[in-house]
Image (cartoon, rainbow, N blue to C red):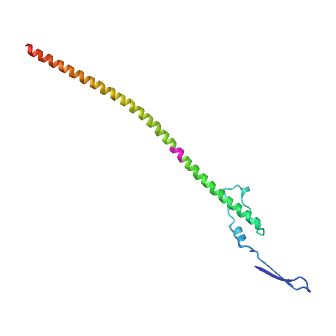
Amino acid sequence: MITSTRRVSPDKSEVRIAFSLDQDSELKDVEESAPSFPDLEHRLQPVSPCSSLRESVQVYRDHCRMAKEFHQVKQEISLLEDRKRELLAELVEDELVAVEMACLEDEFRVLSEENATLLNVHTERAQQLETLSSTNRNQTSQDSSST
């Protein structure tokens, strides 16, 4: 706070003038904090306010608030883009697994059909063997009886 007492003229009483360079502590805070916004283009950086005008200070504060919000949104976008990349990588991996599963299902179907065919052939051959064995036994027993 600066105080000055002056006499304007010899016939007038003294005039006391008091003013403060720190009229509003908020103005001082605004100037001292002077935040930096590296992700804003130079032309979009907040400009220090004219501390004697409340409206200028308010515009500056609003500008700083919006710049902070912009920075936060930019960070959120970056995080979401990272997550998007992760999800896309998972999707590609899932698609590869799905293709592999389809191939394995096809292979399983083919092998199952082949297995069924082999089981049928085995059953037929077992029946033929049984028939031949029976026929062979009958012939052996007939040969033994005839001698």
Magenta region, residue range:
86-90
Which residue is farthest top?
A: 146
Residue at the image point whose x is 90% and y is 85% from the top: 12
Image quarter (top left, top right, bottom left or bottom right) of the C terminus: top left
Q: Is residue 45 left or right of residue 95?
A: right
Q: Is residue 4 above or below residue 128?
A: below
Q: Is residue 138 left or right of residue 53?
A: left
- Quadrant for residue 19, please give it: bottom right
Q: Give whichever of 145, 83 is nearer the camera.
A: 145
What secondary structure predominates along the stretch shown in magenta?
Answer: helix
Residue at the image point whose x is 49% and y is 39% from the top: 95
Which residue is farthest right?
A: 11
Q: Give whichever of 145, 26 is nearer the camera.
A: 145
- Quadrant for residue 38, please give it: bottom right
- Quadrant for residue 54, please give it: bottom right
Residue at the image point whose x is 89% and y is 82% from the top: 8
Q: Is residue 87 magenta?
A: yes
Q: Is residue 102 above or below residue 56?
A: above
Residue at the image point whose x is 61% and y is 55% from the top: 75
Q: Give whichever of 61, 49 is nearer the camera.
A: 61
